[in-house]
Image: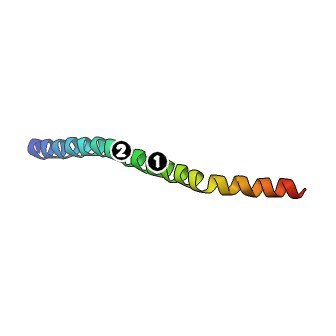
Amino acid sequence: MNSFIATINAVLHTAKGKLQEEKGATMVEYGIMVAFIAVVVMAAVIILGPKVADLFTSVSAAL
């Protein structure tokens, strides 16, 4: 019976360690995704910014 408890204890300890390691990996993955989204948004603003400014200028002039 003691060997069974020791085995269960070892399995739970190993699982706990793996879960804690995955939390760090998940955080890194989310950080990479946020950085990628930020780069895409900045690229969109740089590309579309002058066009939107021209659009507002033309609408303002028409009024």
Q: Which residue is mark 1?
A: 34
Label 2 secondary element: helix
Residue type of the residue flagged with mark 2: Val
Q: Residues within 10 Å of mark 1 (few under 14, many from 20)?
A: few
Left-right relation of 41 to 7: right
Position in image of residue 63 (x %, y %): 90, 56
The answer to the question of whether label 2 and label 1 lie on touching residues, with beta carbons closer than 8 A, is no
Quarter occupied by the N terminus: top left
What label does residue 28 carry, if any?
A: 2
Residue 30 percent across, percent down from the top left: 42, 48
Of 45 and 10, nearer the camera is 45
Q: How many marks?
A: 2
Could you say where residue 5 lies in the image, as x and y percent from the top left?
15, 43
Mark 2 crowd level (few <14, some 14–19, many ≥20, 10 Å Cα): few
Q: Is residue 61 left or right of residue 37?
A: right
Q: Residue at x 54, y 51 (%)?
A: 41
Helix, strand or loop for disc 1: helix
Frontmost residue, 58 versus 3: 58
- Mark 2 vs mark 1, CA separation in Å: 10 Å
Kind of residue at disc 1: Val
Q: Quadrant of residue 61?
A: bottom right
Mark 2 or mark 1: which is in front?
1
> Which residue occupies 33% across, 41% down?
24
Residue under the image location 64 percent in, 52 percent down: 49
Quarter-of-image position of residue 16:
top left
Q: Earlier in the sequence, mark 2 or mark 1?
A: 2
> What is the basis of the colouring in this image?
rainbow
Asked where in the image residue 9 lies, by quadrant, the reply is top left
Relative to 58, say whether 23 is above or below: above
In the rendered structure, find residue 19 and report the number of the disc placed on it. none
Left/right of residue 54 with respect to residue 7 in the rendered view: right
Q: Residue at x 78, y 53 (%)?
A: 57
